[in-house]
Image (cartoon, rainbow, N blue to C red):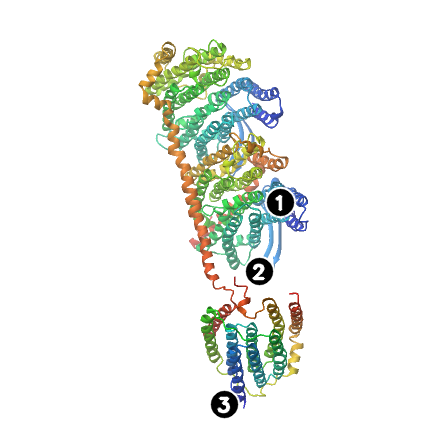
Amino acid sequence: MPAAVPVSYYLILSAILFGLGVAGFLFRRNIITVFMSIELMLNAVNLSFIAFSYQLRQVDGHIFAFFVMVVAAAEAAVGLAIILTVFKNRSTLAIDDVSSLNN
Amino acid sequence: MSLLNLVLLLPLLGFLACLFLPKKNLGLIRMFTLLVSLAIFVVSLGLTAPFLDKGNGTWFVTDVPWIQSPEIRYHVGLDGLSVWLVLLTTLLTPISVLVSWNYIAKRPKEFYAFLLLLEFGLMGVFVAWDLFLFYVFWEICLVPMYFLIGVWGHERRIYAAVKFFLYTMAGSVLMLAAIIFLYVKGNTFDYINLLELLQSGRLALTSQEQLLLFLAFFVAFAIKVPLFPLHTWLPDAHVEAPTAGSIMLAAVMLKMGTYGIVRFCLPMFPNAARECAPWIVALALIGIVYGALVALVQPNMKKLVAYSSVSHLGFVVLGAFSFNQNGLDGAVYQMLSHGISTGALFMLVGFLYERTHSLEIKDYGGVSTPAPWLSTVFLITTLASVGLPLLCNFVGEFLVLQGSAAVNIYWTAFAALGVILSAGYMLWLYQRTFMGEATDELKHHMPDIGARELAASIPLIILMVWMGTYTKTFLPSISAANARILEQSKTRVEMRVQATAGESVHVR
Amino acid sequence: MQDQQLWLIPALPLVGFLINGLLGRRFPKALVNVVALGSVLFSFAWVLKTFNALGGLETAHVERYFSWIQSGSLDIGFDLSVDRLTAVMLLVVTGIGSLIHIYATGYMSHEGGYYRFFAYLNLFMFFMLTLVLGNNFLVMFVGWEGVGLCSYLLIGFYTLKKSAGDAAKKAFIVNRIGDFGFALAMFLMVVNFGSLDFQKVFAAVKPMPVEQTAGLLTAIALLLFVGATGKSAQVPLYVWLPDAMEGPTPVSALIHAATMVTAGVYMTARSAVIFQHSPMAMDVVAIVGVITAVMAATIGITQFDIKKVFAYSTVSQLGYMFIACGVGAFSAGIYHVVTHAFFKALLFLGAGSVIHALGGEQDLRHMGGLWKKIPITFGVLACAWVAISGVPPFAGFYSKDEILLAAHHHAPWMYWVGVVTAGMTAFYVSRAIFMCFFGDYRGHHHPHESPVSMWGPLAVLALLSLAGGMYFKVPHYLEPMFPAAEGHHDETLVMISVAAGLLGIGIAALLYVVRPGLPDTIAAAFGPVYKLVYNKYFVDEIYDAAIVNPLVGTSRSFLWRVMDAGIIDGIVNGTGFAAKTIGGGLRLLQSGNIRSYAAWVTAGCVLVLLAIGVVAGGVR
Amino acid sequence: MDAFLFFLFAAIAVACGINLVLQTHPISSALSLIGVMGSLAVLYLLLGAEFMAAAQLIVYAGAIMVLFIFVIMLLNAGAERSKSTSLLAKALGIPALLAFLGVIGFLIQALLPNTELVKFGAFTGGTAQAIGRKLFTEYLLPFEVTSVLILIAILGAVVLARKEI
């Protein structure tokens, strides 16, 4: 085992996690799980920000990741509120049952 | 602020003010619109002063930056070609308001507001000297007309409105592409600058580029004219439009196309225009006879008049592409007189529709017995439309035919067939509608022309006679503007001679 | 020569038209009469005053007012002029016009739309005078189209009758076809001579060589003649004139006998310079004249409607005038215009008087024996009868004689055809007179004599018909303009033509007075021929079948329904439909299912990444 | 040591990620997500992002995930009833996903061949002090905007969660 891994490994990990997030989004039906998959994707992106930040020896990547986190927090607040409302109105959490875009 | 800016601004202000009127108060709304449009007309009369006085030149020019980058300027001005079209617009707007007086009950506020917006857009088209500004006005016109047809039209209004919109958009998108191309090449949207660049040869276009640009502009205009075979939106739009919409559409909006041809197509791309002229003239000639023949058999009055417009506007295109003074003068004169006569025809058909709610000719007959004055006004308009001397259309048609005769007498002979046929369909219409015995029901529903209707008709009748007899009011300024356009569309021929000869020596 | 205010001559009737047209509805009849008659009489007076002031009129007196159409080098003004030719026409138009206006006050007194009738009549006078006075072809064209319009309005005066409307429309459209030729001729003139002024055009034409075959001048002359055939009812465009009899009788007399229909002759004579340069065009004019004269005369023989008989007679007589023009005897043609105006106006007005007396009856078969009941009418009609039959020394004899002699000089066969036609003319007019006034009364209405306002003008016209030919030596007056052909006055030829006329009267007397049963026998004997002629050679039907119906039919079933609605609109709507279909296909992708969107996004990401890879790889 | 820690926590993160996708009950997914976030925090630390690591744990694992679990429990969300998912999502999504992973992996290898080795302590710019300085100088405006964003989010959440809707 090498003593250290290059930054590209972190990027590949980020890609894998992002892919898992996409998979969750694609194949899960529970609206909360779908939401969590989105959070997973955001995290994956954060990882690559921080990895690049290390590569470039700049702190800006951290700042971006920080902003992403802020947005994620806001999104979670609003998103969960929406989920609550949807559940109140439809009594279901299955994403296919609440699709009104599809006539 | 020059008078022109005032005239241009007033309808826009009127439009905005109209939006703040109370929705329910029909009387206030229409009276307000009438007064505003009349005021605009009166003010616009002042625009003619320099043209009656001197006859030529460009007046009331305003040239200020509008958008910094890309540089688009608010550049407006008036020459002999524009001024009468502006006046036509300002005259027909109050008439349209009068015509709609009792007819529009649904959403009157929006209706009258759109009429004013339409006036604003139409005038803008005729006075814009910046290509981008021109395009903006061109598109502004589309919106109110779309709604006029789509909201206040008859049964198939949505179909007609969408067809109208798509047809026109299809053309204007091409025009926009051409305008942008010119901007990329010449780095200016300003018409005067562009023309200068093109003429001096500093903006050199290959003949293929010129041809494509010409076609892009021409197709946009030809759809609006409408030139055969791009005309099928017109009958539908007219039949479905409310009376005021038909009037504005036929009398002014179609002139946007012919105005564009004369203003832009000929001077900017003279070589391409000359190259295409035989084909375009052929289409115009077909349109003249074809429109007349199809008009002959229409069972619906508005369709009949619409097809007659196709025929009449064929004359305008024919005249424009004769490339001589007579033809061009005739074309412009025909634009104006067609505006007056066909506007009046649509108005009168509208009067009939208000009485019986039918546009089918077979539902009429013998109207002259209960409504003699209405039939008299209709007859005069009919005669103007068939080109009787001393009435307006004759002068235009005569000059157009004279101009085309100078090029090719067979064109003239073919086009003159349209004049014969026009007598056929218009008089047949008149006979079937106004002569014979009226049924009792028709008599009951057919009061004679009222004061309001008379107020709308008389100015048009007077103009028909005026334009037919005392052409000195209009023709000199038109001639002067056309002479300049002809000059501009000639010089480039020399340029090409120079270019092909490969010499820097001045040829002539 | 000082200004003569020539514009007043047409302007006065125009003022009359405007007053009566706009306000006449509220006027009492007397006031309408004052306005209508006053304007025409004043105009007549002004004509006389003008001639008095202008004297001999050796050269044309031109007055220019304002420029009408000015475009480039083309400058057409509202210019009026008077020369001897105009003078003759002006006197005929205003003189006969005044008489007919007076007559009409009596004839129309019981009709509705009285003011409208007189307004139209005044408008007609305005246009006719403009036509005659115009100093360029375009002003002439204004009058030319204008009289066509008035003809339209007056033929269709009885708006409730469909046949009147049809006839009016037919007249206008057929005239339009003629105008088409006139207009094309004008365009050619402007293109080649740069002007439409008579003086300039003729000055340009005069030095040109005489064209033996086709050429510019032949084309112009023939196109002008197309105009003339329309207005003056020559073959093949004569079909509107018989139908035009739907109009009130004074109209038939004024417009369709005395003045408007002779405009073609006037125009031909006016353009004599052009015609003279093209022998071919002259031949065409003469031959068309001959054909028209014969054809119309044969039809006239068979008709039973009194006005139709005279209408065909008019067509035939107009043919005579064109024979005169075609053989180069323009002054003889104008001479016949004048005498014809006298006796044909009289014939029509007399017929109107008969119709008036019989309460609207027009069929000769329902008349008869009227000479005792309406003696004045009979008296004046008899004058017209002898005049048109060419009995010397009455009006018709002189002008017809001039024409026939000129024709003989040009081509003897034309003379012989002319003589036969003269015989036929005498025959059918005599036939009409005999059927109307002799024998037993076959109608039911109680006849009554017309009022003085009607027979007064008739008496004046009767006087003119009798003596007009003798006193108004038109060819002599026009000699400065149209030098007389080197005519040797051959007494024999004159005798023959007179004999032909008398023979016609004699045969008519034999058939319709002495042996009333004979005509039917003859008609039966010539069954098919008679039928052909009686039905006017089926020309109207042929035109309908060959031109009108195919045109309308094709327009309706092919151009409109197939071409316009089918093909052109089909392509347009097809484009729309195609866009819709493609859009519909694409719409399936927009399932509204978020996950499938996500899948698409993922696929899109792959493409973007690939693109990045390609670009980055390329950079490296 | 650095490599070991990376592989260990990478494995945990991936395992938890897979678990998140495969579990049918949302509460299991939520717990897996916490696992992912925790291991990511360690990896941040390795990359010298000490402030971010702390924030990750406090904000994400602490606040946000608590909110999720709270909602799941509030709604008493049960396991998913198995229903056929969109055919298109499967037919297109699976190959697209695989292609995505393949392409991005290849691109990272191809375009970034010689990246730095990650050694703990090699980069020390990620302290709270450094980030604070950046945030309140260069990124002041965006930072203030985020505060507005969060305010709006709070308002939105309050409005949405009201009883009347």
Q: Residues within 10 Å of mark 1 (few under 14, many from 20)?
A: few
**Residue B2 rendering spot, x and y as whole percentages:** 65, 48
Q: Is C454 above or below relative to A92? A: above
The residue positioned 61% from the left and 57% from the top of the image is B66
**Residue B159 rendering spot, x and y as whole percentages:** 51, 49
Dot 2 falls on which chain?
Answer: B
Query: Which of the two residues, A24 or C351, is positioned nearer the viewer here?
Result: A24
Judge if badges 3 and 1 mark residues of a common chain. Answer: no
Q: Secondary structure at mark 1?
A: loop
Q: Secondary structure at mark 3?
A: loop
Decide if residue B484 is in sight here.
no
**Amino acid beneath label 2:** Pro
Pointer 2 or 1: first along the chain: 2
Quadrant in which the N terminus of chain C is drawn:
top right
**Amino acid beneath label 3:** Pro
Mark 3 vs mark 2: in front: 3
Which quadrant would residue C101 be assigned to in this image?
top right
Q: Is residue D113 left or right of residue C21?
A: left
Q: Residues within 10 Å of mark 3 (few under 14, many from 20)?
A: few
Q: Which residue is mark 3?
A: A2
Q: Which residue is mark 2?
A: B70
Q: Is A61 above or below relative to C534? A: below
Q: Is C157 above or below relative to C357? A: below
Q: Which residue is mark 1?
A: B105
